[in-house]
Image (cartoon, rainbow, N blue to C red):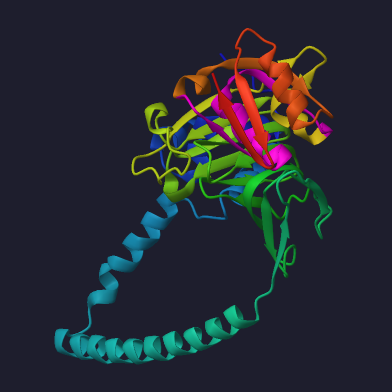
């Protein structure tokens, strides 16, 4: 039996049955939590706060059950309202339909004109980094963002007026300023993230076979683009990975968009020797390679050193390494990796690096 007497709002929020109660999608969950709330009036304020957080994180959507009830009421009015004569009722319906159609056309045209104007004047701020470059950004709401190499962060000029939304391509570490009335949203090509005040890392490069989000502090909910994978709630130290293609399809560097739903895994982040977190080591200007194959390392090194790496033999891509990289040059890194049991040869021609047996 779970003791919820000391639960805070976030503890309630990560309970899947509580989420279904808030969403109004499961009658058993609704019934259970209504009884629980009646039996524990001392927790009313905490539960109300958890429901408010759910509403903010889920985009202020009305409960499904409430929407169904409203739909029924609109479609099937009470019998007392049907005592009008049939012919008169029909004519009223026809007249109302004509008015609605004309009104809809007018509203549609007005909306299109206004929307075109809005699109024309909308200003988007874009922050970008090149290969080998990292950049720190302070957003208008006080949120701190560290942008990794070869990444782009975009936000509208009216960011923080009514909402806080950004779009990311690449990798960034977010330390979000808390605001209980405005969820902070991160959109990527693979998933969308909703947060309030928290710290987390997002890695979503379009040329890599997987994307991931790692939670350091606070609480986030995330959902795959087009609803793939449902809504996922992460606790601190957890990492969710979206695999866009199956491993045998990763041979080509230019990946094609996956047609099926992505494979999704949830694990803990990797912590090593001096309590360094592998997934966020880059924010400390270092790379932690922890039992990774050469093909994975290649993607990191290319962005970190602004080079292009190619293998003359596919077998080289499966060599595995563990190493720490700080201020070394690309040549020093390759020399150190070569000294391990996975021996190989390398040749550097400007920005081209060729790995061979």
- Where residue 139 sits in the image (x, y, percent)? 80, 57
Count of numbered circles on the image: 0
- Quadrant showing the C terminus: top right
Q: Is residue 38 left or right of residue 5?
A: left
- Quadrant showing the N terminus: top right
Q: Residue at x 41, y 35 (%)?
A: 245
Front-most of residues 38 and 160: 160
Residue range in magenta is: 284-313
Residue 202 sits inside the magenta stretch = no
Q: Residue at x 63, y 25 (%)?
A: 346
Q: Is residue 230 left or right of residue 39?
A: left
Front-most of residues 356 and 123: 356
| Residue found at the very far left of the displayed protein | 87
Residue 69 seen from this side: yes
On screen, residue 68 above or below 287: below
- Where residue 212 sits in the image (x, y, percent)? 58, 35
- Where residue 348 sits in the image (x, y, percent)? 67, 34
Q: Residue at x 81, y 53 (%)?
A: 137
């Amino acid at each position: 039996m779970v003791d919820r007497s000391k639960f805070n709002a976030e503890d309630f929020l990560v309970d899947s049955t509580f989420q279904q109660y808030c969403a109004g999608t499961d009658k058993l969950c609704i019934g259970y939590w209504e009884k629980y709330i009646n039996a524990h009036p001392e927790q009313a304020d905490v539960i109300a706060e958890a429901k408010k957080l759910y509403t903010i994180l889920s985009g202020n959507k009305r409960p499904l059950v409430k929407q169904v009830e409203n739909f029924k009421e609109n479609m099937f009015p009470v019998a007392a309202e049907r005592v009008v004569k049939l012919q008169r009722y029909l004519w009223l319906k026809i007249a109302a339909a004509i008015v609605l159609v004309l009104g809809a056309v007018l509203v549609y045209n007005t909306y299109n004109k206004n929307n075109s104007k809005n699109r024309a004047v909308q200003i988007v701020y874009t922050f970008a980094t090149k290969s080998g470059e990292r950049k720190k950004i302070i957003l208008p709401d006080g949120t701190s963002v560290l942008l990794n190499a070869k990444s782009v962060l975009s936000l509208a000029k009216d960011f923080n007026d009514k909402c806080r939304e950004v779009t990311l391509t690449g990798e960034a570490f977010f330390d979000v300023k808390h605001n209980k009335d405005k969820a902070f949203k991160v959109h990527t090509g693979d998933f969308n993230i909703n947060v309030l005040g928290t710290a987390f890392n997002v890695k979503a490069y379009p040329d890599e076979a997987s994307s991931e989000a790692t939670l350091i502090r606070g609480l986030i909910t995330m959902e795959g683009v087009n609803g793939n994978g449902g809504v996922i709630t992460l606790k601190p130290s957890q990492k969710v990975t979206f695999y866009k293609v199956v491993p045998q399809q990763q041979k080509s560097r230019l990946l094609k968009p996956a047609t099926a739903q992505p494979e999704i895994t949830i694990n803990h982040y990797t912590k090593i020797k001096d309590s360094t977190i592998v997934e966020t080591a880059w924010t400390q200007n270092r790379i932690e390679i922890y039992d990774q194959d050469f093909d994975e390392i290649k993607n990191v090194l290319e962005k970190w050193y602004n080079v292009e790496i190619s293998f003359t033999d596919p077998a080289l891509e499966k060599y595995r390494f563990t190493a720490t990289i700080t201020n070394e040059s690309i040549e020093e890194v390759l020399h150190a990796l070569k000294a391990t049991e996975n021996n190989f040869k390398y040749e550097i021609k400007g920005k081209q690096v060729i790995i061979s047996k």
